[in-house]
Amino acid sequence: MVYVFLADGFEEIEALGTVDILRRCELEVKTVSITENLQVTGSHNISVIADLVKEDMKEDDIDALVLPGGIPGADNLEQCGFVTDLLKRKAAEGKIIAAICAAPKVLGLIGLLSGVKATCFPGYEAKLVGAITKRSDVVCDKNFITSKGAGTTHAFAREIASALGKNIQARRVIKSMQY
């Protein structure tokens, strides 16, 4: 199961594009509101209905956790103790932890990127505490996948799918989308 966290102010393309591509790759994906409401509003005023709220997650079935960027979405993820505690536990278990745009800062600020190669939206590098920052569109290191921003969503989702054993499907899906 892949859980994609939605916080008010999330970047819509990064969240929904990733969900779309992963579902096309035949992965089970659920969007998770970090608020008490299923309705979450993105950074460009697009409201979506999440599949569930954070309290309804099943921690035992987590294969990957995905953090879209966007401001103030990434800030809201950073301030959510439920999210940061879960990230720490699942990273320690070797689960896939993926963050795009401003969201890799969440991983850096909670100490998960020490010695890990990572990328982020330009200007957020200092918040990737302990990371070996790269300028690449997508960086995969250990169980972490990080990406630069909305324009890299296809490549980001492809890497998540590949890390979860769906490499062939991911290549087909991305090709069929004319990416």
Image: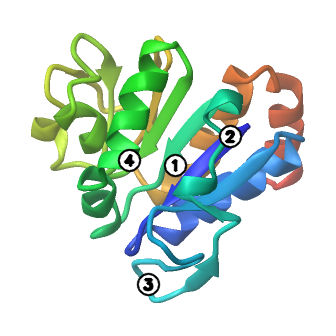
Rounded to the nearest whole Å, what is the CA distance between mark 1 and mark 3?
18 Å
SS label for mark 1: helix
Q: Quickly name the residue at label 3.
A: 44
Residue 157 spot, x, y in % from top left: 64, 42
Task: Say what amino acid the circle numbered 2 marks.
Answer: Val
Q: Quadrant of residue 132?
A: top left
- Mark number displayed over residue 152: 1
- Mark number displayed over residue 2: 2
SS label for mark 3: loop
Name the residue located 34 percent from the left edge and 55 percent from the top edge. 77
Proximity of marks 4 and 2: CB atoms separated by less than 8 Å: no
Q: Which of the two marks, 1 or 4, is nearer to us in this view?
A: 4
Q: Is 72 located above or below residue 22 in the figure?
A: below
Q: Is 53 located above or below residue 166 in the figure?
A: below
Between 149 and 142, which is closer to the camera in this rendering?
142
Residue furthest toward the bottom?
A: 45
Task: Say what amino acid the circle numbered 1 marks.
Answer: Thr
Mark sitting earlier along the chain (1/2): 2
Name the residue located 27 percent from the left edge and 22 percent from the top edge. 113
Between 122 and 8, which is closer to the camera in this rendering?
8
SS label for mark 4: helix
